[in-house]
Image (tube, rainbow, N blue to C red):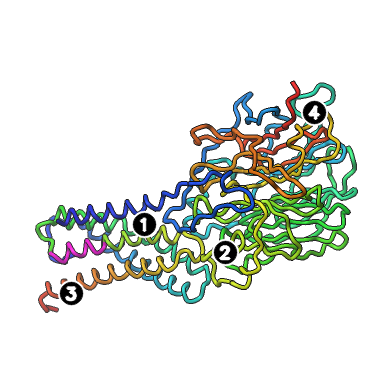
Amino acid sequence: MKNSLRRGAFALALAAVLGGCSGKASLEPAQQSGSAPPLPKAQNFLVPPMQVPDKAGWAQGQSPKVAAGLKIERIASGLMHPRQLYALPNGDVLVVESNGPGSEPVTTPKQLVAGMIKGNSGKGDKGGNRITLLRKAGGAAGGEWTKHVFIEHLHSPFGVQLIGDSLYVANTDAIVKFPYQSGETQISASGVAFADLPGTINHHWTKALLASKDGAKLYVGVGSNSNITENGLEVEYRRAAVLEVDVATGSSRIYASGIRNPTGLQWEPQTGKLWAIANERDEIGADLVPDYLTSLQEGGFYGWPYSYYGQNVDDRVVPQRPDLVAKAIKPDYALGSHVAALGLWFSETNALPENALPEKYRHGAFVAEHGSWDRSPLSGYAVVHVAFEDGKPVGAPEPVVTGFYSDDEKQLYGAPVGLAQDQDGALLIADDVGDTVWRVSGDTR
Amino acid sequence: MSSRAEPRRSAIASGLYGLLNPIPFGCFVAALIFDTLYLRSGVALWNKGAAWLIVFGLLFAVIPRLINLVQVWITSRVFATRIDRLDFLLNLFAVVAAIFNAFVHSRDADAVMPAGEWLSVCTVVFLSISHLLVAVQSTRLKGGRP
């Protein structure tokens, strides 16, 4: 009898723990895209779903898959965690090699365990803390571009913008300004501190950067300091927000808030409106909460942490704020849950040379999805294209570049992050797991 | 566990048991206090402190629980009293509740509550009853002698 009691207790414990592990996704990312994504009921887990493929890197000659009518080539390899790309006016391309500053203390047993598991994917590898300049090798088309170390000794940089002859680099804790002259392959001048950015903890460390067309303002995407305020509300000051920095003075204000992790900012070419991609909260379900692409309204509040997708209240936050929930703006376009959108690029609609992208990719946004860690099956790990009509996204995101992980979802070859377009109109993709920069163009053969 | 002299008991095992067995109880009581402070204040620090206490309480419980398992059900089986066996089971329930609680405490922010508080209460109640029973048994066995 005692033995059966003991067995019963163990069986119960096992069943409950395993029960907590389940939580497989029931919606495809495409099903959860668009302006009105279905949102299942939020749930809490004993063990949140977690699936992380192991880093394998790209084999010789191996590359991601591209959609029909496109070709892909490697233009740089052997980089140190390339996160962001920026095309200079003379055709040179800057690659920001960076990763988190590692300044977030381990304050819970979960962080200790999750950090070890997530590290296997290679997403946590050390960044170069530098910017490398890529220049197209003269003459014959194809082949890797030449690499020049452009700026060194940065502090977890992410965003880069050129205004006139000043290059602004967003380190994780401050914007630094460098003098730049067209054609140079190295900046040896030390940067001048330009504006402070929220720099404590840096749970979300990337600081996306975008200059206004007139060069008078810089917009900075600042991610939250937690998943859902588990580090306390006091460390969320000026976080989960897009800041507007005055270029003349360096002073800043909150332009839009309640955006958990705005990792990419761009101007929509038709309307000239500011758009952002954002990563939403984790651990309330494999199909919650979809990451999104949205236009930003000045002074707008987008819900984090109190609610998601408008007025869907997150009851993990104390105190609750019904007044703010009532104001929360629903994002324009869902990309799918946990895809981890980290790169945004509106394909330019102006004159493109003959080897540019096919016509269907010239009106809309490319989004690089770094890929999920808390969802099974995996989602993201792709560059998708969202078509725009009259300045608004339409239809489902269409995969453009895929094949970043093995068919059994065990091995990770690469993960797309920053996006840019080169002078010929080809799409450039930074791959921070494969330590490579890819170039995608129309297959004219 | 009974304090009756039992010839087959290892001195090392008893020493280890005496040294380590009180630690989990202390950790779990402290976790309950932290959980209650979190519920009253909403300050995340208490919540995180409780999560560590529960994990360390469980780690420290491994060796004394194994010693107790072997002594009650194998080596000292003949000598074990009903209270000894009850003590074993209450500890088992407490450990199971604490394992659940460790997972519940891995949730973010207020998702820990109220389940975390109730599981902390269960763990402490199971252990308190077992400690009381063992204390009363030990007094009885001494038969009132000083």
Q: Chain of mark 4?
A: A
For the residue labelled by badge 1, is the local secondary structure a helix, a strand or a loop? Answer: helix
Query: At numbered mark 4, what does the secondary structure look like: helix, strand or loop?
Result: loop
Q: Amino acid at mark 4?
A: Asn
Please report contact status of discs 4 and 3: CB closer than 8 Å, yes or no.
no
Q: Residue A355 has which mark? A: 4
Type of residue at label 3? Val
Q: Residue under label 2, please give it.
A: A229
Q: Chain of mark 3?
A: B
Instruction: Tell me, yes or no, whether the two marked residues, 2 and 1, touch with CB atoms within 8 Å.
Output: no
Chain ID of residue with mark 1: B
Residue A174: % across, % down: 75, 57
Within 10 angstroms of label 4, few (less than 14), some, or many (20 or more) residues?
few
Whole-percent x and y of residue A180? 87, 45
> How many neighbours does mark 1 have within 10 angstroms: few (below 14), some (14-19), or many (20 or more)?
few
- As measured in the structure, the alpha-carbon distance from the residue carrying label 4 to the one carrying label 1 is 62 Å
Residue span colored magenta: B82-91
Q: Secondary structure at mark 2?
A: loop
Q: CA distance from mark 2 to mark 4?
A: 47 Å
Do labels 3 and 1 touch, CB within 8 Å?
no
Residue, disc 3: B136
Residue A97 seen anywhere in this rendered image of the structure: no
Asked where in the image residue A193 lies, by quadrant, the reply is: bottom right
> Residue B47 location, x and y as percent?
48, 67
